[in-house]
Image: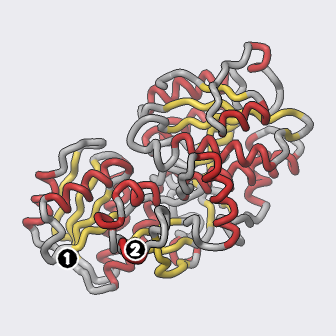
Amino acid sequence: MGRTTTRIAGLARALTVCAGAALVPLPLHAQQDDGLKLGVLNDLSGAFADLGGKGSIIAAQMAIEDAGGSVLGRPITLVSADSQNKPDVATGIARRWFDVEKVDAILDPVPSSVALGLQELVRERKKMMIIASSGLADLTGRFCGPTTFQWAYDTSVLAKGTGATVAKSGLKEWYFVTADVAFGHSLANESKAVVTANGGKVVGEVRHPYLTSDFSSFLLQAQAAKPDVIALANSGTDTTNSIKQAIEFGVTSGTSRLVAMLAFVTDIKSLGLERSRGLLLTESFYWDLTDETRAWSKRFAERSGGSMPSMAHAAIYSGTTHYLKAVAAAGTKDAEVVAERMRATPINDFMIQDGRARKDGRIVHDFYLFEVKAPQESKGPWDLYKLVRRIPAAEVTPPEGSTGCKL
């Protein structure tokens, strides 16, 4: 799909997109409409397409539909494009969106390098950005922005959720297999700090190229150290491929436990329960938690061909809905004014209860620690998790002013 931008005109066109209809570019005069325009800029064809991808477009469409298709008396429209997981490509698309097509908000930039690359442009153009699939903690830390919000998770939360639980269980010696990018470094470093704070010890680390296919040498190095835990500080297909190859090479047949520091429900579905059984995961959403999550997820599945939503999909709906309500309440599209309204308004929906948006862009809410079910425990194709415990927001949320954000 590359640089091709998909344009969806209004709510009626949005509904046909969800049903899989052909996409038709808008004429130039329609592109200049002074309504509210949102843009999903994520991975539509690569390593992160399942966890975000077209599902995030569907989630945004649902939010637009539920808002009535308009705000401030003008239509809400949606455009989308494939970032190709390249910051330069994404920045070029975003610049055109802002300057030519008058896009007001970018949704779901992924991976973290793309979100980070867009941050300064969003700040300069005074636009809105809602992050769901990307988890680099620095996006609400030293690189925070006044109109950027990170809705689903970050590396700090993952470390304090999964890392602390595993370390406290008595597994003390850790070896990290880390993606050699900013996100991987952040996830590993945050996790190391949590491990050592809970009496554990880091016995080694190996870094692998980003989005690689062969993990054999890295996993065998980890296995040779004979740690209690081999921790995967990566994401997307890097995570699923490293888990598959760890099983293939017998890395998990000894005393070492494999721990994925980040995995989405779509990753677990791809792996299958036989491969992923027993994995511990920290997430902000699971489709089968409550009557409300099940009801919304059923609606999503009807539009996605039966696939249940990931936490990124839920976050795009939640974040977009909160944003649209703030625009209506503020009476303006001005991103800085709307951001203040978003921070002043509590977040309560099927995903987040009693949540709030902070000045640094962090969304404060509870998380959940899950364990992947064994095949015999599952009652259906998407019955993948069992809840270990709900993690209170206060347990995983760094104090305001401690993240390096200068706002």
Dot placed on the residue nearer the N-terminal end, 2 or 1:
1
Residue of label 2: 373
- Report whether residue 123 is seen: no
Task: Specify the quadrant of the image occupied by residue 284.
Answer: bottom right
Q: Nearer the viewer, residue 403 or 169?
A: 169
Give the residue at x 48% y 72%: 379
Residue, far right:
73
Q: Is residue 243 above or below residue 88?
A: below
Residue type at mark 2: give it.
Answer: Lys
- Report whether residue 107 is seen: yes
Return the x and y of residue 362 as percentages of the image width and height: 59, 59
195 vs 256, left or right, is right
Cα distance between the residues tagged 2 and 1? 21 Å
- Colouring method of the image: secondary structure
Return the x and y of residue 355 as percentages of the image width and height: 68, 68
Residue type at mark 1: give it.
Answer: Asp
Q: Tag 1, which secondary structure?
A: loop
Return the x and y of residue 271 as percentages of the image width and height: 34, 57
Q: Nearer the viewer, residue 405 or 327?
A: 327
Give the residue at x 27% y 65%: 231
Give the residue at x 68% y 54%: 299
Q: Is residue 270 above or below residue 71?
A: below
36 vs 402, left or right, is right
Give the residue at x 58% y 52%: 313
Q: Nearer the viewer, residue 179 or 330?
A: 179
Residue 228: mark in rendering: 1
Residue, far left:
224
Task: Specify the quadrant of the image occupied by residue 269.
Answer: bottom left
